[in-house]
Amino acid sequence: MDQQGILLKELLEERGVSVSPEQLDQLAMYYELLVEWNEKMNLTGITERDAVYEKHFYDSASLSFFVDMTKAERMADIGSGAGFPSLPLKIIFPHLKLTIVDSLNKRIQFLQTVASSLGLLDVACIHGRAEDIARLPEHRDQYDLVTARAVARLSALNELCLPFVRKGGTFAAMKGADPSEELLEAKKSLSELKGKHLSSHHLKLPFEQSDRHIILIGKNDCTPAKYPRKAGIPMKQPII
Ligand code: SAM
C-alpha cells in the first residue's frame, strides 16, 4: 500500500471514517488515471501525489465529517471537474447512487473512464449545464445530497444546485476562504430557491493547513417553476 494511502486512512479514521485496503487501491488507481489523463487535457493543476491525496481526496472526504453519508442515498455533484468531491466520496461510501453533471464533455469522458476502471456501480456522468439538467423531471427535486466544490459564488451556486435537491434534502457547498460575505450575499437566492442555511463548518487541511469551509443548506419546498433560469444567466446575473 502506498504511503499517502496509509496516511489518508489514518487521518480519516481519526474522524471516524473507515477506509478498506480495496478502497485505498481504488483511490490509487484514480490517482494514476488523473495524472495520465491530465497530460492530454486540463483536469487539475495539482498532480504531485501528496498534494492530490490531501487537497483532492482528503478535502473531498471531509464532507463526511459533517454530513451523515449513510443517510444519503441519491447524491448529485454539480460541476465535478475531475471528480471532486463526489468520486472520493463514492469510493469511500459505495452505497451512494451518484449523478455527476459537468458542462465539459472531455471531463465527463474522464469520469466515466474512472468509474468503469474502478468498477464503481451506480454512477451516472451527465454532460450538460446544470441549468438544463435540473429541468428534467428525473433530476429535479430528487436528490438527498447535492455537492459543489469550487464552481461559483454561493448566490449563483444556489440556483445551479438547489433545484436538484429534494424537499428535506441537503446542499453542501465546499468553499476555501471564509464564506461569511458570500452567505450574506446569497440571502435572496436562498429564499427564492427554497433553501435555508443550516450550518457552516470550518476545517484545516492536515499538512498544508489551508482553510476550508463547508456550508450546509436545507430545502423546505420544491423548486419554483421559474428556476433555474436559462443556462448562463445564474452566473451572469446572480439573484442578489
Ligand atoms: N468541483 C471540481 C473541483 O473542485 O475540483 C471542479 C471545479 S472546476 C473549477 C468547475 C467545473 O464546473 C468545471 O469542470 C466546469 O466545466 C463546471 N461547470 C461550470 N459551470 C457549470 C454549469 N453551469 N453546469 C455544469 N457544470 C458547470
Image (cartoon, rainbow, N blue to C red):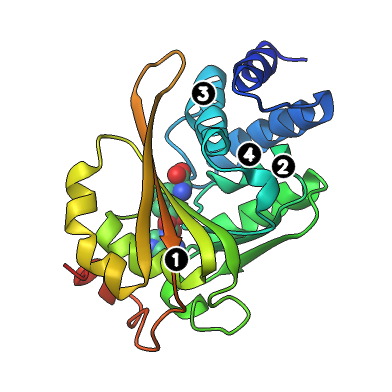
In space, the residues marked 3 and 2 are separated at their CA atoms by 18 Å
Q: Residue at x 39, y 67 (%)?
A: 160
Q: Residue at x 35, y 73 (%)?
A: 193
Q: Secondary structure at mark 2?
A: loop
Camera-near label (4 vs 2) is 2
The one nearer the camera, 155 or 38, is: 155
Q: Tags 1 and 4 in contact by the CB under 8 Å rule?
A: no
Q: Which mark is residue 51?
A: none
Q: What type is the residue that disc 1 sits on? A: Lys
Q: Residues within 10 Å of mark 3 (few under 14, many from 20)?
A: some
Q: Residues within 10 Å of mark 2 (few under 14, many from 20)?
A: many
Kindly identify which residue carries mark 1: 219
Camera-near label (1 vs 4) is 1
Q: What type is the residue that disc 3 sits on? A: Glu
Labels 1 and 4: the sequence-earlier one = 4
Labels 2 and 1: the sequence-earlier one = 2
In this image, 50 relative to 91: left or right? left
Q: What type is the residue that disc 2 sits on? A: Phe
What quarter of the picture does the C terminus occupy? bottom left
Kindly identify which residue carries mark 2: 93
Residue 192, percent from left and from top: 29, 75
The one nearer the camera, 59 or 240, is: 240
Q: Tags 3 and 2 in contact by the CB under 8 Å rule?
A: no
Label 2 CB sits under 8 Å from any ligand 1 atom: no
Camera-near label (3 vs 2) is 2
Kindly identify which residue carries mark 3: 54
In space, the residues marked 1 and 4 are separated at their CA atoms by 25 Å
